[in-house]
Protein backbone atom coordinates (compact mmCIF):
# COMPACT_ATOMS: atom_id res chain seq x y z
CA UNK A 1 0.00 0.00 0.00
CA UNK A 2 1.27 3.55 -0.67
CA UNK A 3 2.83 5.56 2.11
CA UNK A 4 0.25 7.61 3.97
CA UNK A 5 0.06 11.35 3.34
CA UNK A 6 2.18 13.59 5.54
CA UNK A 7 -0.01 15.31 8.12
CA UNK A 8 0.84 18.96 8.48
CA UNK A 9 1.71 20.08 12.01
CA UNK A 10 2.43 23.44 13.58
CA UNK A 11 6.08 24.09 12.81
CA UNK A 12 8.50 23.68 15.74
CA UNK A 13 6.07 22.07 18.13
CA UNK A 14 7.74 19.28 20.10
CA UNK A 15 7.05 16.11 22.01
CA UNK A 16 9.24 13.68 23.96
CA UNK A 17 9.20 9.90 24.36
CA UNK A 18 11.32 8.21 27.05
CA UNK A 19 12.07 4.50 27.36
CA UNK A 20 12.63 3.69 31.03
CA UNK A 21 14.16 0.77 32.90
CA UNK A 22 12.06 -1.20 35.40
CA UNK A 23 14.37 -2.54 38.10
CA UNK A 24 14.06 -4.65 41.25
CA UNK A 25 14.21 -2.65 44.47
CA UNK A 26 16.37 -5.30 46.18
CA UNK A 27 19.17 -6.17 43.72
CA UNK A 28 18.69 -3.46 41.04
CA UNK A 29 18.58 -5.98 38.20
CA UNK A 30 15.91 -5.49 35.54
CA UNK A 31 12.42 -6.62 36.58
CA UNK A 32 9.87 -8.11 34.16
CA UNK A 33 7.09 -6.05 35.73
CA UNK A 34 5.69 -4.04 32.81
CA UNK A 35 2.33 -5.85 32.90
CA UNK A 36 1.81 -5.10 36.59
CA UNK A 37 2.93 -1.50 36.26
CA UNK A 38 0.75 -0.80 33.22
CA UNK A 39 -2.27 -2.42 34.89
CA UNK A 40 -1.85 -0.23 37.98
CA UNK A 41 -1.30 2.94 35.93
CA UNK A 42 -4.42 2.17 33.88
CA UNK A 43 -6.69 2.52 36.90
CA UNK A 44 -6.76 6.32 36.68
CA UNK A 45 -5.81 9.04 34.17
CA UNK A 46 -2.11 9.26 33.32
CA UNK A 47 -0.52 12.70 32.71
CA UNK A 48 0.70 11.75 29.24
CA UNK A 49 0.87 8.40 27.50
CA UNK A 50 2.43 5.15 28.73
CA UNK A 51 2.90 2.05 26.59
CA UNK A 52 4.79 -1.26 26.67
CA UNK A 53 8.06 -1.74 24.86
CA UNK A 54 9.89 -4.73 23.36
CA UNK A 55 10.57 -6.55 26.64
CA UNK A 56 8.76 -6.79 29.96
CA UNK A 57 11.44 -4.80 31.79
CA UNK A 58 10.84 -1.52 29.99
CA UNK A 59 8.07 0.98 29.35
CA UNK A 60 7.77 4.07 27.18
CA UNK A 61 6.19 7.34 28.28
CA UNK A 62 5.28 10.25 26.02
CA UNK A 63 4.41 13.88 26.59
CA UNK A 64 1.79 15.90 24.78
CA UNK A 65 2.58 18.58 22.21
CA UNK A 66 4.54 21.58 23.52
CA UNK A 67 6.04 24.81 22.28
CA UNK A 68 8.06 25.95 25.34
CA UNK A 69 10.48 24.52 27.87
CA UNK A 70 8.50 25.25 31.04
CA UNK A 71 5.32 23.29 30.22
CA UNK A 72 7.38 20.45 28.69
CA UNK A 73 9.43 20.06 31.86
CA UNK A 74 6.35 20.38 34.07
CA UNK A 75 4.63 17.50 32.27
CA UNK A 76 7.76 15.34 32.42
CA UNK A 77 7.99 15.94 36.17
CA UNK A 78 4.31 15.03 36.58
CA UNK A 79 4.80 11.85 34.52
CA UNK A 80 7.85 10.90 36.57
CA UNK A 81 6.11 11.50 39.91
CA UNK A 82 3.09 9.44 38.84
CA UNK A 83 5.34 6.57 37.75
CA UNK A 84 7.36 6.61 40.96
CA UNK A 85 4.21 6.55 43.11
CA UNK A 86 3.00 3.48 41.21
CA UNK A 87 6.40 1.78 41.40
CA UNK A 88 6.54 2.32 45.17
CA UNK A 89 3.24 0.45 45.49
CA UNK A 90 4.69 -2.47 43.51
CA UNK A 91 8.08 -2.42 45.28
CA UNK A 92 9.98 -1.78 42.04
CA UNK A 93 12.04 1.15 40.82
CA UNK A 94 12.56 3.11 37.61
CA UNK A 95 15.76 4.45 36.11
CA UNK A 96 16.96 6.32 33.08
CA UNK A 97 20.17 5.47 31.25
CA UNK A 98 20.69 4.06 27.76
CA UNK A 99 21.60 0.55 28.97
CA UNK A 100 21.19 -1.44 32.16
CA UNK A 101 24.76 -2.01 33.42
CA UNK A 102 24.59 -5.73 34.18
CA UNK A 103 21.35 -7.33 32.89
CA UNK A 104 21.64 -10.44 30.71
CA UNK A 105 19.71 -10.19 27.46
CA UNK A 106 18.76 -13.88 27.48
CA UNK A 107 16.83 -13.38 30.75
CA UNK A 108 14.48 -10.83 29.19
CA UNK A 109 10.91 -11.68 28.19
CA UNK A 110 9.28 -10.32 25.05
CA UNK A 111 6.15 -8.31 25.84
CA UNK A 112 3.05 -10.18 24.66
CA UNK A 113 1.98 -7.95 21.80
CA UNK A 114 1.61 -9.07 18.15
CA UNK A 115 4.16 -6.60 16.74
CA UNK A 116 6.77 -7.48 19.37
CA UNK A 117 6.26 -11.22 18.80
CA UNK A 118 6.63 -10.64 15.06
CA UNK A 119 9.86 -8.68 15.56
CA UNK A 120 11.18 -11.36 17.91
CA UNK A 121 10.48 -14.01 15.29
CA UNK A 122 12.22 -11.94 12.60
CA UNK A 123 15.26 -10.71 14.51
CA UNK A 124 15.89 -13.61 16.89
CA UNK A 125 18.18 -12.82 19.80
CA UNK A 126 18.57 -9.22 18.59
CA UNK A 127 15.04 -8.53 19.83
CA UNK A 128 16.01 -9.32 23.43
CA UNK A 129 19.32 -7.51 23.02
CA UNK A 130 17.21 -4.51 22.08
CA UNK A 131 16.52 -4.03 25.79
CA UNK A 132 18.13 -0.62 25.53
CA UNK A 133 16.60 2.72 26.37
CA UNK A 134 16.40 5.88 24.31
CA UNK A 135 14.85 9.32 24.21
CA UNK A 136 12.98 10.23 21.03
CA UNK A 137 12.17 13.85 20.23
CA UNK A 138 9.49 14.85 17.71
CA UNK A 139 9.54 18.23 15.98
CA UNK A 140 6.45 19.42 14.12
CA UNK A 141 6.80 20.30 10.44
CA UNK A 142 4.49 22.46 8.35
CA UNK A 143 5.03 20.30 5.26
CA UNK A 144 6.57 17.02 4.18
CA UNK A 145 9.35 18.76 2.26
CA UNK A 146 10.16 20.85 5.33
CA UNK A 147 10.46 17.60 7.27
CA UNK A 148 12.99 16.16 4.82
CA UNK A 149 14.92 19.44 4.74
CA UNK A 150 15.24 19.44 8.53
CA UNK A 151 16.03 15.72 8.66
CA UNK A 152 19.02 16.07 6.36
CA UNK A 153 20.13 19.49 7.63
CA UNK A 154 20.45 17.97 11.10
CA UNK A 155 22.96 15.34 9.94
CA UNK A 156 25.99 17.31 11.07
CA UNK A 157 24.47 17.92 14.51
CA UNK A 158 23.69 14.28 15.31
CA UNK A 159 27.01 13.90 17.24
CA UNK A 160 25.88 16.73 19.54
CA UNK A 161 22.81 14.83 20.67
CA UNK A 162 24.71 11.56 21.10
CA UNK A 163 27.40 13.22 23.22
CA UNK A 164 25.01 15.37 25.27
CA UNK A 165 22.67 12.48 26.10
CA UNK A 166 25.20 9.64 26.43
CA UNK A 167 24.38 7.52 29.50
CA UNK A 168 25.28 3.94 28.59
CA UNK A 169 28.94 3.28 29.41
CA UNK A 170 28.25 -0.10 31.08
CA UNK A 171 26.95 -3.26 29.44
CA UNK A 172 26.94 -6.88 30.63
CA UNK A 173 28.80 -5.86 33.78
CA UNK A 174 31.77 -4.11 32.17
CA UNK A 175 32.78 -0.62 31.14
CA UNK A 176 32.53 -0.67 27.35
CA UNK A 177 34.79 2.42 27.06
CA UNK A 178 31.94 3.94 25.01
CA UNK A 179 29.94 6.85 26.41
CA UNK A 180 26.96 5.50 24.43
CA UNK A 181 27.14 1.74 23.92
CA UNK A 182 23.38 1.65 23.30
CA UNK A 183 23.67 2.81 19.70
CA UNK A 184 25.85 -0.19 18.86
CA UNK A 185 22.83 -2.39 19.65
CA UNK A 186 20.58 -0.27 17.44
CA UNK A 187 23.11 -0.39 14.58
CA UNK A 188 22.83 -4.19 14.47
CA UNK A 189 19.41 -3.87 12.82
CA UNK A 190 19.47 -3.92 9.00
CA UNK A 191 17.18 -0.88 8.61
CA UNK A 192 19.06 1.41 11.00
CA UNK A 193 21.51 4.22 10.30
CA UNK A 194 20.65 7.18 8.07
CA UNK A 195 17.69 7.92 5.86
CA UNK A 196 18.20 7.96 2.06
CA UNK A 197 18.98 11.40 0.71
CA UNK A 198 16.06 13.14 -0.89
CA UNK A 199 14.52 16.55 -0.25
CA UNK A 200 11.25 15.77 -2.03
CA UNK A 201 8.44 13.91 -0.26
CA UNK A 202 6.97 12.88 -3.61
CA UNK A 203 10.28 11.26 -4.52
CA UNK A 204 10.64 9.65 -1.09
CA UNK A 205 7.09 8.32 -1.03
CA UNK A 206 6.49 7.22 -4.62
CA UNK A 207 10.04 6.19 -5.46
CA UNK A 208 12.07 5.02 -2.44
CA UNK A 209 9.30 3.78 -0.14
CA UNK A 210 7.32 2.13 -2.93
CA UNK A 211 10.40 0.24 -4.07
CA UNK A 212 11.22 -0.84 -0.51
CA UNK A 213 7.66 -1.98 0.07
CA UNK A 214 7.72 -4.01 -3.16
CA UNK A 215 10.64 -6.02 -1.77
CA UNK A 216 8.50 -7.15 1.17
CA UNK A 217 11.08 -5.80 3.61
CA UNK A 218 8.95 -2.96 4.99
CA UNK A 219 5.26 -2.28 5.49
CA UNK A 220 5.34 1.12 7.19
CA UNK A 221 7.70 3.79 8.52
CA UNK A 222 7.83 1.86 11.81
CA UNK A 223 10.06 -0.69 10.10
CA UNK A 224 12.86 1.86 9.72
CA UNK A 225 15.16 2.36 12.71
CA UNK A 226 16.93 5.40 11.25
CA UNK A 227 18.69 7.92 13.48
CA UNK A 228 16.16 10.50 12.28
CA UNK A 229 12.99 9.47 10.49
CA UNK A 230 9.86 11.21 9.28
CA UNK A 231 6.60 10.37 11.02
CA UNK A 232 3.91 11.21 8.46
CA UNK A 233 1.00 10.29 10.74
CA UNK A 234 2.18 12.90 13.27
CA UNK A 235 3.55 15.45 10.80
CA UNK A 236 6.95 15.37 12.53
CA UNK A 237 10.52 14.29 12.27
CA UNK A 238 11.73 12.02 15.06
CA UNK A 239 15.29 12.19 16.43
CA UNK A 240 16.20 8.76 17.82
CA UNK A 241 19.93 8.85 18.67
CA UNK A 242 19.67 10.03 22.29
CA UNK A 243 20.19 7.71 25.24
CA UNK A 244 17.50 8.13 27.87
CA UNK A 245 18.94 10.71 30.27
CA UNK A 246 19.04 10.07 34.00
CA UNK A 247 16.86 13.12 34.74
CA UNK A 248 13.77 14.66 33.20
CA UNK A 249 15.56 18.03 33.31
CA UNK A 250 18.16 16.76 30.84
CA UNK A 251 15.43 15.23 28.66
CA UNK A 252 13.56 18.56 28.43
CA UNK A 253 16.78 20.44 27.67
CA UNK A 254 17.66 18.11 24.80
CA UNK A 255 14.21 18.56 23.26
CA UNK A 256 14.45 22.34 23.44
CA UNK A 257 17.97 22.28 21.98
CA UNK A 258 16.61 20.39 18.98
CA UNK A 259 13.66 22.79 18.68
CA UNK A 260 15.95 25.84 18.68
CA UNK A 261 18.32 24.20 16.20
CA UNK A 262 15.43 23.51 13.82
CA UNK A 263 14.30 27.14 14.14
CA UNK A 264 17.79 28.24 13.13
CA UNK A 265 17.93 25.80 10.20
CA UNK A 266 14.57 27.00 8.89
CA UNK A 267 16.09 30.45 8.41
CA UNK A 268 17.99 28.75 5.54
CA UNK A 269 21.18 30.61 6.48
CA UNK A 270 23.30 27.46 6.33
CA UNK A 271 24.32 25.73 3.06
CA UNK A 272 21.74 23.29 1.73
CA UNK A 273 22.23 19.64 2.76
CA UNK A 274 23.83 17.36 0.17
CA UNK A 275 24.44 13.65 -0.24
CA UNK A 276 28.18 14.23 0.28
CA UNK A 277 27.48 15.48 3.80
CA UNK A 278 27.09 11.81 4.75
CA UNK A 279 30.66 10.91 3.76
CA UNK A 280 31.72 11.57 7.36
CA UNK A 281 28.43 10.71 9.04
CA UNK A 282 29.32 7.27 10.42
CA UNK A 283 32.76 8.47 11.56
CA UNK A 284 31.24 11.42 13.43
CA UNK A 285 28.59 9.14 14.93
CA UNK A 286 31.27 6.72 16.15
CA UNK A 287 33.35 9.49 17.71
CA UNK A 288 30.38 10.77 19.68
CA UNK A 289 29.42 7.27 20.87
CA UNK A 290 32.97 6.34 21.82
CA UNK A 291 34.31 9.55 23.34
CA UNK A 292 31.25 11.70 24.06
CA UNK A 293 32.11 15.37 24.50
CA UNK A 294 35.82 14.52 24.11
CA UNK A 295 35.27 13.23 20.57
CA UNK A 296 36.36 14.83 17.32
CA UNK A 297 34.09 15.23 14.33
CA UNK A 298 34.64 16.26 10.72
CA UNK A 299 32.58 19.20 9.50
CA UNK A 300 30.77 17.82 6.41
CA UNK A 301 31.10 21.09 4.47
CA UNK A 302 34.61 22.29 5.34
CA UNK A 303 36.05 18.77 5.90
CA UNK A 304 37.94 20.15 8.92
CA UNK A 305 38.36 18.28 12.20
CA UNK A 306 36.57 19.99 15.09
CA UNK A 307 36.02 19.23 18.76
CA UNK A 308 32.50 18.05 19.57
CA UNK A 309 32.66 19.96 22.85
CA UNK A 310 33.69 23.22 21.16
CA UNK A 311 31.14 22.76 18.39
CA UNK A 312 28.34 22.30 20.95
CA UNK A 313 29.44 25.43 22.82
CA UNK A 314 29.61 27.45 19.60
CA UNK A 315 26.17 26.20 18.58
CA UNK A 316 24.69 27.10 21.98
CA UNK A 317 25.98 30.65 21.52
CA UNK A 318 24.53 30.73 18.01
CA UNK A 319 21.16 29.47 19.24
CA UNK A 320 20.81 31.84 22.19
CA UNK A 321 18.46 34.26 20.32
CA UNK A 322 16.33 31.30 19.24
CA UNK A 323 16.19 29.88 22.76
CA UNK A 324 15.17 33.31 24.00
CA UNK A 325 12.45 33.61 21.35
CA UNK A 326 11.17 30.15 22.31
CA UNK A 327 11.21 30.99 26.04
CA UNK A 328 13.74 28.22 26.61
CA UNK A 329 16.85 30.05 27.83
CA UNK A 330 16.68 27.97 31.02
CA UNK A 331 18.19 25.01 29.13
CA UNK A 332 21.52 26.78 28.66
CA UNK A 333 22.71 26.05 32.20
CA UNK A 334 21.77 22.39 31.85
CA UNK A 335 23.57 21.90 28.54
CA UNK A 336 26.60 24.06 29.29
CA UNK A 337 27.15 21.95 32.40
CA UNK A 338 27.60 18.90 30.15
CA UNK A 339 30.40 20.62 28.24
CA UNK A 340 32.14 21.61 31.47
CA UNK A 341 33.63 19.67 34.35
CA UNK A 342 30.34 17.94 35.15
CA UNK A 343 30.38 16.03 31.88
CA UNK A 344 27.55 13.97 30.46
CA UNK A 345 25.68 11.26 32.33
CA UNK A 346 28.15 8.60 31.18
CA UNK A 347 30.86 10.53 33.04
CA UNK A 348 28.63 10.75 36.10
CA UNK A 349 27.85 7.02 36.07
CA UNK A 350 31.55 6.18 35.92
CA UNK A 351 32.07 8.42 38.96
CA UNK A 352 29.33 6.49 40.77
CA UNK A 353 31.12 3.23 39.99
CA UNK A 354 34.33 4.68 41.40
CA UNK A 355 32.46 5.63 44.59
CA UNK A 356 30.42 2.43 45.06
CA UNK A 357 32.74 -0.10 43.45
CA UNK A 358 29.92 -2.06 41.81
CA UNK A 359 27.50 -1.90 38.91
CA UNK A 360 24.66 -2.41 41.38
CA UNK A 361 25.70 0.87 42.97
CA UNK A 362 25.59 2.50 39.53
CA UNK A 363 21.94 1.45 39.05
CA UNK A 364 21.03 2.61 42.57
CA UNK A 365 22.51 6.02 41.75
CA UNK A 366 20.52 6.14 38.49
CA UNK A 367 17.31 5.33 40.39
CA UNK A 368 18.03 8.14 42.87
CA UNK A 369 18.88 10.56 40.05
CA UNK A 370 15.49 10.07 38.39
CA UNK A 371 13.71 10.64 41.70
CA UNK A 372 15.73 13.74 42.59
Image: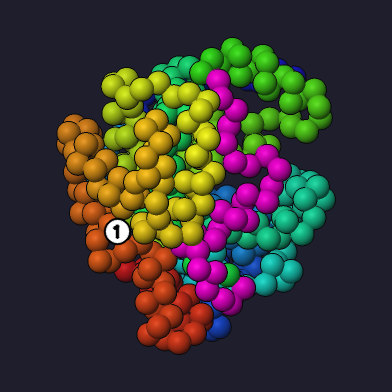
Span colored in magenta: 172-198
Residue 141 visible in this rendered orientation of the protein: yes
Judge by depth and name the residue closer to the eye, 44 or 314.
314
Which x, y percent locates residue 321? Answer: 17, 34
Instruction: Sort mark 1 into few (<14), some (14-19) or many (20+) by Cα contacts within 10 Å.
Output: many
Prevailing secondary structure class for the magenta stretch in the rendered image: loop
Q: Residue at x 45, y 77 (%)?
A: 362
Q: Secondary structure at mark 1?
A: helix
Which x, y percent locates residue 21? Answer: 53, 64
Which image quarter holds the C terminus?
Answer: bottom left
- Dot 1 corresponds to which residue? 338
Q: Residue at x 60, y 28 (%)?
A: 196
Which image quarter holds the N terminus?
Answer: top right
Q: Which quadrant of the figure has residue 126? A: bottom right
Q: Is residue 306 above or below residue 35?
A: above
Q: Is residue 202 above or below residue 193?
A: above
Q: Is residue 112 left or right of residue 232?
A: right
Q: Is residue 82 above or below residue 313?
A: below
Which x, y percent locates residue 262? Answer: 35, 31
Q: How many marks?
A: 1
Q: Is residue 192 magenta?
A: yes
Q: Residue at x 64, y 31 (%)?
A: 221
Residue 41 visible in this rendered orientation of the protein: no
Judge by depth and name the residue closer to the eye, 154 or 245.
154
Q: Residue at x 50, y 68 (%)?
A: 177
Q: Is residue 130 magenta?
A: no
Q: Is residue 342 left or right of residue 347?
A: left
Amino acid sequence: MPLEAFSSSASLTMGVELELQIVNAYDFDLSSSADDLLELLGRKPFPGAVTPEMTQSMIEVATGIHTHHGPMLAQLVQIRDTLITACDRLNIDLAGGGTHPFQHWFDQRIFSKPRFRELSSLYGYLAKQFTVFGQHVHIGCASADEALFLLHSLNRYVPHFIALSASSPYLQGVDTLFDSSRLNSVFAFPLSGRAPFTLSWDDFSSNYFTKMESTGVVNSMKDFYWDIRPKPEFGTIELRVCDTPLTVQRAAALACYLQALCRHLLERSEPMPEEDDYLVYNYNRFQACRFGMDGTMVHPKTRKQISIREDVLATLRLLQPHLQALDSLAVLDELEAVTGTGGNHATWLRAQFADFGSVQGVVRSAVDALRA
